[in-house]
Amino acid sequence: MLGLGTYGYTAPMASKTVVGYEAPDGVDIRGRYDEELAKILTKDALQFVADLQREFRSRIKYAMECRREAKRRYNEGALPGFDPATRYVREVDWVCAPVPTAVADRKVEITGPVERKMIINALNSGAKVFMADFEDALSPSWENLMRGQVNLKDAVDGTISFHDQARNRVYRLNDQTAKLFVRPRGWHLPEAHVLIDGEPATGCLVDFGLYFFHNYATFRRRQGEGFGPFFYLPKMEHSREAKIWNCVFERAEKMAGIERGSIRATVLIETLPAVFQMDEILYELRDHSVGLNCGRWDYIFSYVKTFQGHSDRLLPDRVQVGMTQHFMKSYSDLLIRTCHRHGVHAMGGMAAQIPIRDDPAANEAALDLVRKDKQREVRAGHDGTWAAHPGLIPACMEVFNNNMGNAANQIQTMKREDAANITEVDLIQRPRGVRTMEGLRLNTRVGIQYLAAWLTGTGSVPLYNLMEDAATAEISRVQNWQWLKYGVELDGDGLGVKVSLDLFGRVVEEEMARIEREVGREKFKKGMYKEACKIFTRQCTTPTLDDFLTLDAYNHIVTHHPKPSSRL
Ligand SMILES: CC(=O)SCCNC(=O)CCNC(=O)[C@H](O)C(C)(C)COP(=O)(O)OP(=O)(O)OC[C@H]1O[C@@H](n2cnc3c(N)ncnc32)[C@H](O)[C@@H]1OP(=O)(O)O
Ligand SMILES: O=CC(=O)O
Ligand SMILES: [Mg+2]
């Protein structure tokens, strides 16, 4: 007879022999034991993850040290720019491997966390692609990550279902589904529940390794038409990081005994340093690439982070930093030219608007903003775009279909040679706009509520009729930090109010009171708003900017379970 032990392992009651995950030598699983998860955390799959970790850990550490070195230079006043040493990669003509037919048409891609019901809804949504997210949209708790792996395996197998008991509704896959891409975490995030040789594993190698190991064969048969699996790769800052991914892919292909170039990935260009490395990133991944994507939200966050030491590059209110700002338009235009020159997709990004159910006029206005954003993208030459919500797909699809007709993409037809003239100055031009008290308040209100959701396991939330995730919340955080650091004078009220610790303290108090009123006392008490407020406030006021909101916050969601031991 089996009994569930206090620490999450299952022990036969009579003999006291403890059952935990069967891990290979040097691998220690400190996350809660669960029979369902044990089907993912098998000895062979963990061996594959450990092999990746051992092979690549020193290169990953070096890449992270290079990021710190670049940060030191920017903080001393240097500006990011093109690397003269790799001019030949930018100037010589070369192309990536041909785009597989399975993913030639990517006009609308839906994104969402690897949550069971959402995966089914996204795959059934009518979008061409579903990007299943272990990253910006997911709070990386052990449960979320590992359940996400179970969900994706069931989705790839085609057996996934979900019973919504409250509504007595069963969710299953349609005959026609979106093609699945998976976004692992960024290089910087550890997976504290998987220790390899005594050190936390690299989060993205756990995400990639487990997903690839369990799904490559079925995926290639059912979804990839002989290619795949497909991935999105986030938050890179340099082509050396893309090179590591390329080697990881080659290693995985070798393990699986599949042809080199089977795995395909789209890289998000969502850091300012990476915009100067787009050719180089594609070049490193040329046998495994299906393009680049304009990750606009992290890109804005990265602009502030890169220029944290530059008092002359302050951002206006977050709502004013849109795609029509010169630096954002330049980035998107150059991305399109770069991708099409090398024969791959140039994907657009995410409009933050979501459907507004209880207000038809506001809903129409939101839809109109989404349509305009998509119109701009398709006319500029993007081959597809992102939608945050199934309700937006018809509008996005209509815009792309109307502009592209029957063509699967615009790779050959929109070369954007004019964008060859885009310069370093264009790519870093200061955004225009005003800084207001309402901007400071909104950042604070959104940042705290997002973090409160994240701490309780939800990584993407609707706030004030917009989608908020880790990337958008980062903008709120670093913008507050920047305004505080430089004591900026707020526009708008004619009083010349400066952002100071005192003022910020008052804003935090008032916004917390407003949050309590808005969400209701009960929810406020039960939620993690106070903890979120503490973390957010510290991060906004710390003298040295934290690299990532989620790195510090991660310590609050790690729950280590003791190693199973037969002595207990
Ligand atoms: C910066 C970036 O990285 S962008 C990419 C990362 N961010 C994301 O992926 C955000 C994805 N979107 C979402 O998480 C959600 O749409 C939110 C949080 C913004 C809004 O969520 P909600 O307000 O709960 O949505 P809403 O209540 O309108 O949902 C209605 C239905 O649509 C489904 N739905 C909503 N968004 C999605 C989605 N992205 N994928 C699949 N299904 C979805 C819901 O599950 C729900 O299904 P049901 O009717 O069967 O119960
Ligand atoms: O990941 C996308 C972004 O905009 O950030
Ligand atoms: Mg992002």
Image (spheres, helix red, strand yellow):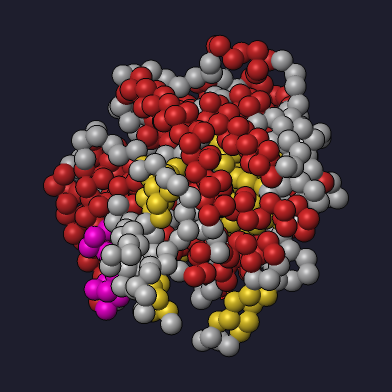
Q: Nearer the viewer, residue 269 or 66?
A: 66
Is most of the magenta stretch helix, strand or loop?
Answer: helix
Q: Nearer the viewer, residue 311 or 127?
A: 127
Q: Is residue 485 visible?
A: yes
Quarter where residue 214 is shown = bottom right
Query: Looking at the image, which residue sits at the far front?
Result: 15
Tell me the quadrant of the picture where the N terminus can be found. Answer: bottom left
Left or right, residue 228 beside residue 553:
right
Q: Residue at x 77, y 32 (%)?
A: 97
Q: Nearer the viewer, residue 317 or 97?
A: 97
Left or right, residue 561 beside residue 180:
left
Quarter where residue 71 is shown = top left
Q: Position of residue 522 (x, y in %)?
A: 27, 78
Q: Residue at x 54, y 73 (%)?
A: 357
Q: Residue at x 54, y 58 (%)?
A: 42
> Is 98 above or below relative to 219?
above
Q: Is residue 362 visible?
A: no
> Is 175 above or below relative to 548?
below
Tell me the quadrant of the picture where the C terminus can be found. Answer: bottom left
Query: Looking at the image, which residue sits at the far left?
Result: 502
Magenta span covers which residues? Answer: 522-532
Left or right, residue 461 beside residue 538:
right
Q: Position of residue 285 (x, y in %)?
A: 65, 31
Q: How many marks?
A: 0
Residue 526 forms part of the magenta stretch:
yes
> Is 132 above or below relative to 503?
below
Q: Position of residue 144 (x, y in %)?
A: 46, 62
> Is 113 above or below relative to 524?
above
Residue 162 forms part of the magenta stretch:
no
Q: Residue at x 48, y 50 (%)?
A: 24
